[in-house]
Amino acid sequence: MLARRPLAAAATAMTAALLALTALSGCASANAASNAALGKQSAATSSAATAEHVAVIGDSIESGLGLDPSEAWPALVASDHGWRLDNLSVPGAGFVAQGADGHDFSAQVDAAIAAQPDLVLIGASDNDLGTDPDQLSTAIRSTVDRLAAALPDARIAGFNALSGQASDEELAGGDAALRQAVLDAGGTWLDLGQPYRGKAGLVQDDDEHPTLPGQQAIAAVVAAKLSL
């Protein structure tokens, strides 16, 4: 029995060493996993910081009335393009018309200027129908000029009013005024047409607002125009 004690002691020492190595290995694995997680988090943070920051100024079509906000076309395009999105759109709002928040587009412009985006998308609105043409034209130019002056490094892209009910003729005046103001400010004009108007399954029961497929149809046109 006495002769075996050194062997037992050696075995015990070896077991302890193996346990220590296992523990160290576990720590190393945990550290590696932690470093990998931190690396992924850092990459995600870096990606978010470099993603294009886009602000959208619009009405109920852009805000996705009747749908979840994530189903509105600005959110759909943002998801596909990896944008950091500020969708500032308010139902009922226009360059003159006051929206659900009691303000016209000027409040959205304030928010866009504060956000300092890389790109501002701003649309004409059928909510301004019935407004005196001169008053509307003045309001549109004032709004676009203020954006351009406050955001000299941002791109501005205007687009025509989207509507399920108003005709092209009814919308023409506001569309033309916004187009000219945006081009004069060095911006880009996006002629989106009417991707959902009068198309079965693309318009909600109110005959004005797009369904999810309708929003998807708008998103596809916007993405195509932006890539030109």
Image (cartoon, rainbow, N blue to C red):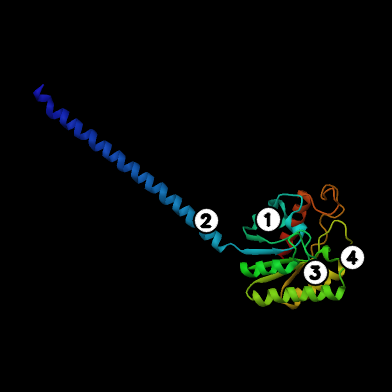
Which residue occupies 9% across, 24% down? Answer: 2
Provide residue 165's location: percent of width, then percent of height.
88, 57
Q: Which residue is mark 1?
A: 75
Q: Quadrant of residue 108?
A: bottom right
Mark nearer the N terminus (1 vs 2): 2
- Residue that badge 4 annotates: 170
Residue 32 in the image: x percent, y percent? Answer: 39, 48
The image quarter in which residue 168 lies: bottom right
* Quadrant of the frame with the C terminus: bottom right
Q: Is residue 49 above or below residue 20?
A: below
Callout 4 secondary element: helix
Amino acid type at image mark 3 = Val
| Number of other residues with Cα within 10 Å of mark 1, as a class: few under 14, some 14 to 19, many 20 or more | many
Callout 1–callout 2 Cβ contact below 8 Å:
no
The residue positioned 82% from the left and 75% from the top of the image is 137
Q: Residue at x 73, y 71 (%)?
A: 188
* Residue nearest the viewer, comparing 130 with 189: 130
Separation (CA) of disc 1 from disc 2: 19 Å
Say which label, 4 or 3, has the lower sequence index: 3
- Cα distance in 3D space between marks 4 and 2: 46 Å
Contact flag, marks 4 and 3 (Cβ < 8 Å): no
Indicate the position of residue 25 as horizontal and vertical percent values: 32, 42
Q: Which residue is mark 2?
A: 44
Name the residue furthest left.
2
Viewer-proximal residue among 13 and 123: 123
Label 3 sits on residue: 96
What is the three-letter code of the residue carrying label 1?
Ala
